[in-house]
Amino acid sequence: MNKKIHKILACIDLSEYSLITLEYAMALAKKTGAQIMVLNVINQRDIYRIDMVYGFSPGYYANGVDAEEYVMEVTKERQGRLKQLI
């Protein structure tokens, strides 16, 4: 059976190793003709902490940042960093 790689999932945490990971995925993609998909995850524990603090003291954050706003801000910031990396 001839198995071919069609997609490569490159999990990037935006650490110092992210560029190495992406370069490796790109080299493999060039050899196989595969498509690269980049993944970055927001830690659920961070969202839980925002919910917990905001729930106990809604006025704690000057801008009233809740978990949904936090996710949107982090997503936007990480998208920018990922674009720079790519």
Image: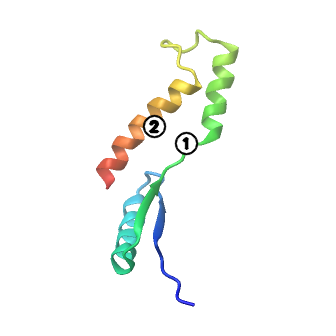
**Label 1 close to label 2 by CB (< 8 Å):** yes
Q: Which amino acid does label 2 sit on?
A: Thr
> Quick one: quadrant of the C terminus?
bottom left
Q: Label 2 crowding class (10 Å Cα cut-off): few <14, some 14-19, many 20+?
A: some
Residue 49 found in image quarter: top right
Dot 2: element: helix
- The structure residue drawn at horizontal position 48% and vertical position 81%, both measured from the top left corner, is 4
Of the image marks 1 and 2, the number of the one nearer the N terminus: 1
**Residue extending farthest bottom:** 1
Q: Where is residue 66 in the image (x, y as percent from the top left)?
A: 57, 21
Q: Against 37, is 53 above or below?
A: above
Residue 57 as seen in the image, left or right of residue 39? right
Q: Where is residue 57 in the image (x, y as percent from the top left)?
A: 65, 12
Dot 1: element: loop
Query: In terms of depth relative to the viewer, which is nearer, 59 or 69?
Result: 69
Q: What residue type is labelled 1?
A: Ile
Q: Label 1 crowding class (10 Å Cα cut-off): few <14, some 14-19, many 20+?
A: few
- The structure residue drawn at horizontal position 63% and vertical position 18%, both measured from the top left corner, is 54
Q: Position of residue 46 (x, y in %)?
A: 60, 35
- The structure residue drawn at horizontal position 65% and vertical position 38%, both measured from the top left corner, is 45
**Residue extending farthest top:** 59
**Residues at marks 1 and 2, CA–CA distance in whole angstroms:** 8 Å
The answer to whether any part of residue 81 appears in the image is yes
The numbered dot on residue 42 is 1
Residue on which disc 2 sits: 75
**Residue extending farthest left:** 84
Q: Against 1, is 85 above or below?
A: above
Residue 76 found in image quarter: top left
The answer to whether any part of residue 17 appears in the image is no
- The structure residue drawn at horizontal position 63% and vertical position 40%, both measured from the top left corner, is 44
